[in-house]
Image (cartoon, helix red, strand yellow):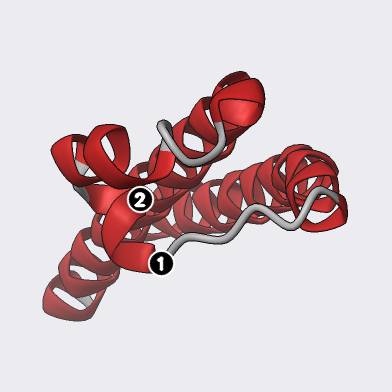
């Protein structure tokens, strides 16, 4: 049981590392376009869709698709990292309990 949990934690850690690299590449491609076109917005816009639609999309209508893609990738990356970190922590706690 202990060995299986340890390998499961290593596998999840590898998955988290792979997802981080994968989304970092995808995010940086879109981020590069946004920086080259001088599109600016705050982190608060990433997590608040109404604020993004009210303030940023009207200011940069030609880059709406790139902005939406960037925000979607950022939110998904954060969500996946949170879930995987929680699972790894829970499995680590189980290992500590049964050790």
Answer yes or no: is residue 39 visible.
yes
Q: Is residue 24 above or below residue 71?
A: below
Residue at image location 21% in from the left, 80% down from the top: 96
In this rendered view, identify the residue nearer to me: 34 or 59: 59
Q: Indicate the position of residue 99 as horizontal and vertical percent values.
A: 24, 78
Q: Could you tell me if the residues under marks 1 and 2 are in contact, i.e. CB atoms within 8 Å?
A: yes
Q: Which residue is mark 1?
A: 42
The numbered disc on residue 98 is none
Numbered-mark total = 2
Answer yes or no: is residue 83 visible.
no
Indicate left or right for 27 with 79 as reference.
Answer: right
Q: Is residue 29 above or below residue 53?
A: below
Front of the two marks 1 and 2: 1
Q: Which residue is mark 2?
A: 46
Q: Indicate the position of residue 28 as horizontal and vertical percent values.
A: 79, 50
Within 10 Å of disc 2 (Cα), the crowding (few <14, some 14-19, many 20+) is some
Residue at image location 72% in from the left, 51% down from the top: 24
Marks 1 and 2, how far apart in space? 7 Å
In this rendered view, identify the residue nearer to me: 7 or 80: 80
Indicate left or right for 64 with 23 as reference.
Answer: left
Q: Quadrant of residue 19?
A: top right
Q: Indicate the position of residue 93 as horizontal and vertical percent values.
A: 18, 73
Q: Residue furthest front?
A: 59
Residue at image location 42% in from the left, 54% down from the top: 81
Indicate left or right for 92 with 17 as reference.
Answer: left
In this rendered view, identify the residue nearer to me: 99 or 89: 89
In this rendered view, identify the residue nearer to me: 89 or 77: 77
């Amino acid at each position: 049981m202990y060995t299986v949990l340890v390998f499961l934690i290593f596998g999840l850690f590898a998955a988290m590392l792979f997802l981080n690299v994968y989304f970092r590449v995808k995010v940086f491609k879109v981020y590069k376009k946004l920086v080259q076109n001088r599109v600016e917005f705050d982190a608060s816009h990433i997590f608040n869709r109404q604020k993004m639609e009210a303030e940023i999309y009207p200011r940069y209508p030609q880059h709406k698709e790139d902005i939406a893609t960037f925000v979607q990738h950022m939110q998904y990356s954060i969500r996946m990292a949170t879930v995987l970190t929680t699972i790894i922590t829970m499995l680590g706690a189980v290992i500590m309990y049964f050790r």
